[in-house]
Structures are given as C-alpha cells and as structure tokens.
C-alpha cells in the first residue's frame, strides 16, 4: 500500500503530539479531517444532527486513543472506520426506537418548487442509500 510520505508522517507526528496533550495539534487534525468524517457520517445516516454527533464522537475517540494509534493505516482510514462504526451503532439505535420525525414530514410538504428542484437529486440519492443495509451503504459512502 502506497502512502503519501509527507502527509502520513505529518499526521503521525500530529497524533503523537495530541497524545502528549498538544491542543493545537488536535485542532489541526480536526480541521484537516472534519470534511472526510462529516461526509462519511452524513452518507451513512442522512441526518445532519446525528451526523454531527457521530463526527464529534469520532474526534473525541481519536483524542482519547491517540497514544494507542499505531499508524498501521492512514489517519483518514482510521477516522473513517470509527465514523462508520459509530454510524452503524446509531442505525441500530434507530431501529430500536423507530419513531416518526413529524418535523421532517411536515417540512417536506412546505418546500417551494424551486427549493425542491435544487435538492431533488441529493434527496433521491439519500433515499436510495437509506434503503440499503448499513454494511452495503458504508461501501458506497466510502
């Protein structure tokens, strides 16, 4: 497996700094990987509030486990895996509580035609993703 040596070693140095309590290093990692983690969580969950929660928990777990990070995989891969696992946990919780979000249903009926046209494609993709089993969904999201 080929890695970008500069980025990989920079990430490893930042993770080591995080492990020794360097907050600026942690902020740098969050800034760099937040878009990736958000994309994975949103793709898995389709709900921005839940995706935000998963994203925050992903970085909390990185912060807490920085000393154990061995660097066997790239940091992006490591964070994506954490985000997917947390998303799968959230999807299992959803199945258990299985409640209807009335705000979403009511909100969908009040969209203007223009707003609907702009989000139509994204909504169709999200609906198709939601129909897939979580394991298969994670493949497409990645």
Image (cartoon, helix red, strand yellow):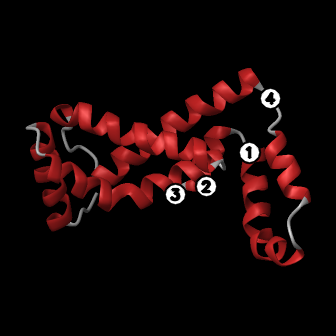
Give the mark nearest the N terminus, 3 or 2.
Answer: 3
The residue where tag 1 is placed is: 132
Please give the label number shown on residue 39.
3
Could you tell me which residue is drawn at 56 percent across and 29 percent down?
A: 89
Real-space CA distance between mark 3 and mark 1, rounded to the nearest whole angstrom: 17 Å
The residue where tag 4 is placed is: 99
Please give the label number shown on residue 77.
none
Quadrant into which the N terminus falls = bottom left
**CB within 8 Å, label 4 to label 3:** no
Horizontal arrangement in the rendering, residue 28 relative to residue 101 (left or right): left
Label 4 or label 3, whichever lies nearer to me, is: 4
Q: Position of residue 17 (x, y in %)?
A: 10, 46
Under tag 3, what secondary structure? helix
Under tag 4, what secondary structure? loop
Label 4 or label 1, whichever lies nearer to me, is: 4
Give the mark nearest the N terminus, 4 or 1.
Answer: 4
Q: Position of residue 125 (x, y in %)?
A: 74, 61
For residue 7, above or below residue 65: below
Could you tell me which residue is drawn at 36 percent across and 50 percent down?
A: 77
For residue 40, above or below residue 112: above
Label 4 or label 2, whichever lies nearer to me, is: 4
Real-space CA distance between mark 4 and mark 3, rounded to the nearest whole angstrom: 25 Å
The residue where tag 2 is placed is: 140
Q: Residues within 10 Å of mark 1 (few under 14, many from 20)?
A: few
Give the mark nearest the N terminus, 3 or 1.
Answer: 3
Give the mark nearest the N terminus, 4 or 3.
Answer: 3
Q: Position of residue 79 (x, y in %)?
A: 37, 46
Give the mark nearest the N terminus, 2 or 1.
Answer: 1
Under tag 2, what secondary structure? helix
Under tag 1, what secondary structure? loop
Real-space CA distance between mark 2 and mark 1, rounded to the nearest whole angstrom: 10 Å
């Amino acid at each position: 497996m080929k890695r970008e040596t500069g980025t990989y070693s920079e990430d490893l140095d930042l993770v080591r700094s995080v492990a020794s309590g360097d907050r600026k290093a942690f902020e740098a990692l969050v800034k760099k990987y937040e878009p990736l983690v958000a994309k994975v969580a949103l793709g898995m969950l389709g709900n921005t509030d839940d995706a935000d929660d998963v994203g925050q928990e992903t970085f909390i777990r990185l912060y807490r486990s920085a000393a154990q990070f061995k660097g066997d995989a790239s940091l992006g891969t490591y964070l994506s895996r954490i985000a997917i696992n947390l998303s799968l946990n959230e999807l299992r919780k959803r199945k258990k509580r299985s409640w209807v979000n009335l705000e979403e249903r009511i909100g969908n009926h009040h969209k203007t035609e223009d707003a609907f046209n702009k989000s139509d494609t994204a909504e169709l993709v999200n609906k198709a993703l939601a129909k897939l089993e979580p394991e298969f969904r994670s493949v497409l999201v990645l």
